Image (cartoon, coloured by chain):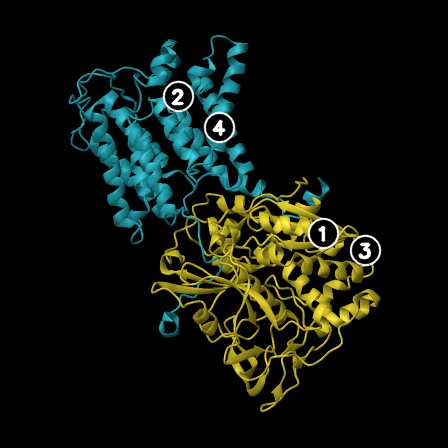
Chain colours: A yellow, B cyan
Amino acid sequence: MPLAFDFRHGVHPPEEKELTRALPIRRMPYPDELVLPLRQHAGKPAKLRVKVGDYVERGDTLADADGFVSVPIHASAAGTVTAIEFWPHPDGSYAEAVRIKVDKFAAQVPRPRLVPEWAGLTTEQVVKAVQAAGVVGLGGAAFPTHVKLAPPKDHPVHTLIINGAECEPYLTSDHRTMAEYPDRVLFGIRVMMHAMGVARCVVGIEKNKPDAIAAMRGAVPKDLDVQILPLTVKYPQGAEKMLIQAVTGVEVPSGKLPVTVGVVVQNVGSVAAIAEVFETGLPLIERIVTVTGHGLLKPQNLIVPVGTKLRDLIAYCGGTTADAAEVILGGPMMGTAVANLDAPVVKGTTGVVVLRKAETRSETVYPCIHCGRCLDACPVFLNPSHLGDLARVGRYEEMAGSHLADCMLCGSCAYVCPSNIPLAQLFQLSKAALRRAQAVAQ
Amino acid sequence: MTTATAPKLIVSASPHVKSVDSTPKIMWHVVLSLVPVVAASAWFFGISALLVIVTASVAALITERAVGKGGTLADGSAMITGLLLGLTLPAGMPLWMVALGGAFAIAFGKAVWGGLGQNVFNPALVGRAFLQAAFPVAITTWPTVGGSFMELKGDLFALPFLHPVTNAITSATPLGLLKFEGKGTDLLPLVIGNTGGSVGETAALVILAGGVYLALRRYLNWRIPASILLTVVVFSGILHLVDAKKPDPLFMLFSGGLMLGAIYMATDMVTSPVTNKGKWVFGFGIGLLVVLIRVWGGLPEGVMYAILFMNALTPFINRATQPAVFGSATRLAK
């Protein structure tokens, strides 16, 4: 059943975007030290190129891409490599990272470089340039962007969809990007459409960003078939499959990639990052981060050098309130809570949300009363209640039979669950258990 | 810079925020919505009704405390079971029987299954079915409505296992009148509730108001009462058209325990289907059984058995009505 501009089910968490929706993007000063993990993207971690003691300029390559589904890591400021060691990673683990002591007296001017002229480039050349610039999906998943620029030959792409839904509560970085830099976003769209040979593009934006919709509409060039489409405000409107359904009315078949229905989805931030590559030649060394939450004293939209420690970022935003209790990287629905504020901002960090104690989840869990609210919330029509029952007794094989693979861990079920059952967490663990079992079997 | 020195950060799994509704909140709102029903029962049957309801509730709560796993009193579910059981009993029932029913409802209707969320049958109805089997006379002795508030409508304080002295004036319920004496009842008293019957089942309008309140707050799924009531009206309407001697649909709707059962018993989340499609099937089944039992069965009333029977079918209904997954072949074929 195609439903224009909408998808079925989903939830309505409080938006909380008023903290930062009207604040212009500002640039954060360089911190004293940057820490750049080699694993900041989906795919293989980058291969180290520098050694301790090296002096690097802003934009220099620290580590090279290791294969096609991988991207290089660049220095986000000029300085000296002081250590290459395991360091707290935002995902909760420790990962190999390059520590750079920022040169306080450097002009932070990147080395002179050739800016590629996009119009004359073939698809392969654009893909290569985007990979060399280390661009990944800035919506959170950090999937290498260049991979999606070269879709398989057997599936022609007819529409490029730009994800400006930003359905996570609190986050406003995409919103501000579109409202303040619509021309840059549209330039990025132009380059992508050229590289992919796609004639049509739709930018989906939730209706709660009227200024972004107006700015983007005003900036659409006459010679490009770009449609700006206001979408229903509902979580998870920005999930790839939900967005595709809202825009095209088509459901991506279960277990298949969007390209099978002829579309490719890119995040607004990634598009802006591509524009940057072909405007200035600079690689992805900084990103726009919404630093916000009621537990933070001065919420802001900031351009942050990749590798800035959360501690420094929070301090720059005035520090936290006395009752601040949880720091989340990304939005509160799908983001990761961090245990260590030494972890740095990475390429996939969309926002930093500081929650007060009273806003965090209660630890009390009640038994499932089979109210069915999770079924009404699940955007992919699973039965989370049943899956949750199975997960708690470790019947993972049966869960696989009940379509666990279709769960995208959006958390809508756990959000509505009156018994406070951590369904999304159970499903994540179950997926991991199934993967382990598969690995053992092979 | 508090964070730099803050010793502890909460690290929870996503989602980190939650909607405001919780299981205890839903349960206590159901209790709250039953207050007018209890008040109506006191209005029609006086202190006897209150004694029955309070006894059933206290027995349920004490049993929950004794056999439930720690801290489950606060979730409110035992309170609902006790209240609902009390509301389905006649005003003159000896209180020791009522107490036994309350204890049975919690112990064998819920605790033996594994507590809240695990039971197959509605606990209050399990308690009532037990009383029906154990004390068939006492549970069908219906005192007349009205009289002074303080009047005891039966041998409420009879000692256990002694024959109660029935000195109160009794009357048949509208359904009993129809089944055994062939007499009808006017619609107005049925809607308002000044007829014979269980203490809490007669005031149909008050119960309906409670249901609307809960449905608006989304604490009950409207599909279940809607499908039950619709099925009863349509099915009995057809029968009435074919044979005018059969009861008319409005009488069917407002008599007996249908309203209380459809709104408060069948909607028990634990024992009703989890899917929306399943809820329609469940309600349809109950409506059908109610009419079948009332019209052709040996008993004048069939709401309790209809719900218990459909409770038993709930796992099968769930299995048969699983949603089709996004992007699955079933959905893409449409």
Quadrant location of residue B85? top left
Q: What type is the residue that disc 2 sits on?
A: Leu
Residue A220 is labelled as 1
Q: What residue sits right under mark 4 in the picture?
A: B226
Check chain identity for marks 4 and 2: say if they share one: yes
Residue type pointed to by label 1: Val
For residue A239, what is the image quadrant? bottom right
Q: Which residue is mark 3?
A: A156
- Asked which secondary structure carries label 1, the reply is loop
Report crowding for label 3: few under 14, some 14 to 19, many 20 or more residues within 10 A (C-alpha): some
**Percent coordinates x, y for residue B268 in the rendering:** 41, 38
Looking at the picture, how far across and down is residue A222, in whole percent?
A: 77, 50
Chain name for mark 1: A
Image point 66% across, 41% down: which residue?
A: A4
The amino acid type of the residue labelled 4 equals: Ala
Report whether mark 1 lies on the same chain as mark 2: no
